[in-house]
């Protein structure tokens, strides 16, 4: 991997003096480049270095995401396979979009949390569980999913509002308040 990413001037400007060429997690690699020609070259160099030690890049699983670009760019090819260009993809559980927005990530995250919350509907309706136990269960199972990778998201007023609306809906369900009950208080 070091040989594939150690080319001079590759990657993106990261700090005052450093460059970031790739993000690695287990067998997943994200190559970062600032220009289209360098991005077209990077997977080929990685493929060449990986093949020297018997590794292969799966062109079916590999995707190209052009961030901030609206122009039709030429395809990226590894060996003879053209990599699919996408508008967004999921990496380590977070949605990454071509325009850098996080609206799709927030919707996806709320959907994942809602699915977990719905699986616990039986628990929320049980009168044999105290409110304290239900809130502890909510805090230990639902909230961590909502907070996953939240430190990497830019929080805006609109996103904060969406999250708060969802959280209040969950808490009303746990407290067994109907929305209509709240209107007449």
Image (spheres, rainbow, N blue to C red):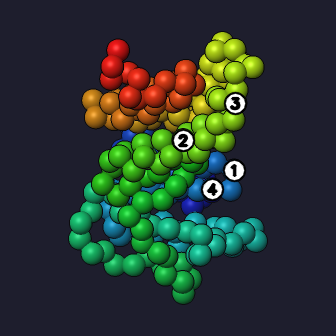
Circle 4 — which element? strand
Residue 118 in picture, x, y percent from top left: 61, 41
Tally of numbered tags: 4
Q: Is residue 166 above or below residue 49?
A: above
The dot on residue 28 is 4
Residue on which the image places disc 3: 123
Q: CA distance from mark 1 to mark 4?
A: 6 Å
Rounded to the nearest whole Å, what is the CA distance between mark 1 and mark 3?
36 Å
Mark 2 or mark 1, whichever is nearer to me: 2
Single out the mark in the foreground, 1 or 3: 3
Distance from Cα at disc 2 to Cα at disc 1: 28 Å
Quarter occupied by residue 137 = top right
Name the outermost residue toward the left: 71
At mark 1, the secondary structure is: loop
Q: Which residue is mark 2?
A: 114
Going from the N terminus, do you reach mark 1 or mark 3 first? 1
Q: What residue did someone put label 1 on?
A: 26
Q: Report which quarter residue 18 is drawn in.
A: top left
């Amino acid at each position: 991997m070091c040989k594939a990413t150690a080319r001079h001037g590759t990657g993106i400007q990261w700090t005052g003096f450093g460059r970031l060429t790739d993000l690695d997690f287990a067998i997943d690699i994200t190559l970062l480049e600032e220009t289209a020609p360098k991005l077209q070259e990077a997977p080929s160099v990685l493929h060449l270095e990986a093949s020297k030690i018997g590794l292969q890049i799966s062109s079916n699983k590999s995707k190209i995401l052009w961030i901030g670009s609206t122009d039709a760019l030429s395809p990226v090819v590894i060996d003879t396979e053209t990599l699919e260009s996408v508008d967004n993809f999921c990496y380590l559980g977070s949605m990454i979009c071509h325009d850098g927005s996080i609206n799709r990530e927030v919707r996806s995250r709320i959907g994942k949390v809602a699915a977990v919350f719905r699986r616990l509907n039986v628990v929320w309706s049980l009168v044999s569980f105290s409110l304290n136990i239900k809130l502890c269960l909510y805090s230990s199972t639902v909230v961590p999913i909502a907070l996953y990778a939240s430190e990497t998201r830019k929080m805006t007023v609109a996103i904060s509002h969406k999250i708060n609306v969802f959280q209040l809906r969950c808490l009303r369900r746990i407290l067994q308040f109907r929305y209509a009950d709240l209107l007449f208080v």
